[in-house]
Image (cartoon, grey):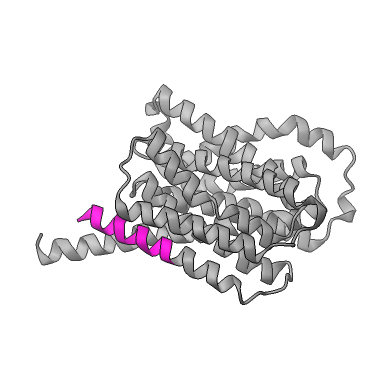
Amino acid sequence: MSHGDSKATGRTNALTIGLLVSGMAIFGSATPVSRLVGQEFPVLLAAEFRVILGTLALLPVAAVHFGEIARVSKADWIRIGVIALFGMFGFTVLMLYGMRLIPGAAGAVVMSTAPALTAVGAIVFLGESLTKTKTAAIVLAVIGVLALNFLSAGEGGNWLIAGSLLVLAAVCCEAVYTLMGRRTTQTVSPVLIAFLAAALSIPLFAPFAIWQATSWTLSETSMAGWMSLAWYGIGTLAAGSWLWYAGVARASGSTAAGFMAVMPCSALVLSYLLLDEPFRWAHIAGFAIVLASVLLMAREHAKMSE
């Protein structure tokens, strides 16, 4: 490889890593923000607002790719439908209901399972190889989860188990979202996938949203509630999906899974900042382990790209 090719590859790797990290950092904000939104809006109505806002935010950038729609295969339409059902509908509902029951820090702990679950899914369902580096990164992610769980013991009250199970189910939906997106981004533009999945999820929420809207009082919602909802749709759904899928298109599913460890870190930090939850220095240990997992996956991606 020439010096010029090496520099170009380095820039490509840096861009891929930047997209994956920023996408997951934005997704991580969904954990504390969903708690704020769930406190002020009926869950299914908030979910409908979220996908409408996300669809509208993605429309201007997705419009330039509308010419691709006629060429989208039946298999890709099915995968986009699965993304809408699990990644948009399932994830949003489960996360909103789950985060009503547990603190943001506890939600971040559960979200830490995402890298391991997604990496295993990529190996089982996408037939990707399990290298020593990927194995080490997955093991570190699991150790980080266990460490954060022990460090968070006693947080969350009586509803900790129920809320954690709902968030864990949301993590499973997130894994499906990533794996289906990995396959679909090979033939369809990432931003178009995000737009179509968001648009297709609007009618999924509509009947439930209309039902809940009948008992909702608009005047009782604060400005902070509306701002949280706006970010939940425009930020976590639109910007997060766009950046994440753009990165996923450039990396293997198991490599991308390693970068999902950024999500719980972002969620935990933002839980301190947005929810005013108590900071614990002991959480630094969990962060260090998760960061090691991300760095290993970044190294593996660079190696595979050589």
Above or below residue 286? Residue 122 is: above
- Along the line of sight, the residue nearer the viewer: 182 or 70: 182
Q: Is residue 23 visible?
A: no
* Number of numbered markers: 0
Picture coordinates of residue 163 (x, y %)? 73, 48
Taking the spot 72% from the left edge, 33% from the top edge, the residue there is 206
Q: Is residue 218 magenta?
A: no
Q: Quadrant of residue 229?
A: bottom right
Above or below residue 268? Residue 43 is: above
153 vs 235, left or right, is right
Instruction: Single out the residue that lies furthest toward the left.
Output: 2
Taking the spot 15% from the left edge, 61% from the top edge, the residue there is 5
162 vs 189, left or right, is right
- Extent of the magenta region: 292-306
Taking the spot 19% from the left edge, 66% from the top edge, the residue there is 7
Picture coordinates of residue 125 (x, y %)? 41, 33
**Quadrant (top left/top right/bottom left/bottom right) for the N terminus:** bottom left
Q: Quadrant of residue 65?
A: top left
Taking the spot 66% from the left edge, 56% from the top edge, the residue there is 107
Picture coordinates of residue 106 (x, y %)? 68, 59
Q: Quadrant of residue 165?
A: top right
Q: Is residue 1 visible?
A: yes
Above or below residue 188? Residue 139 is: below
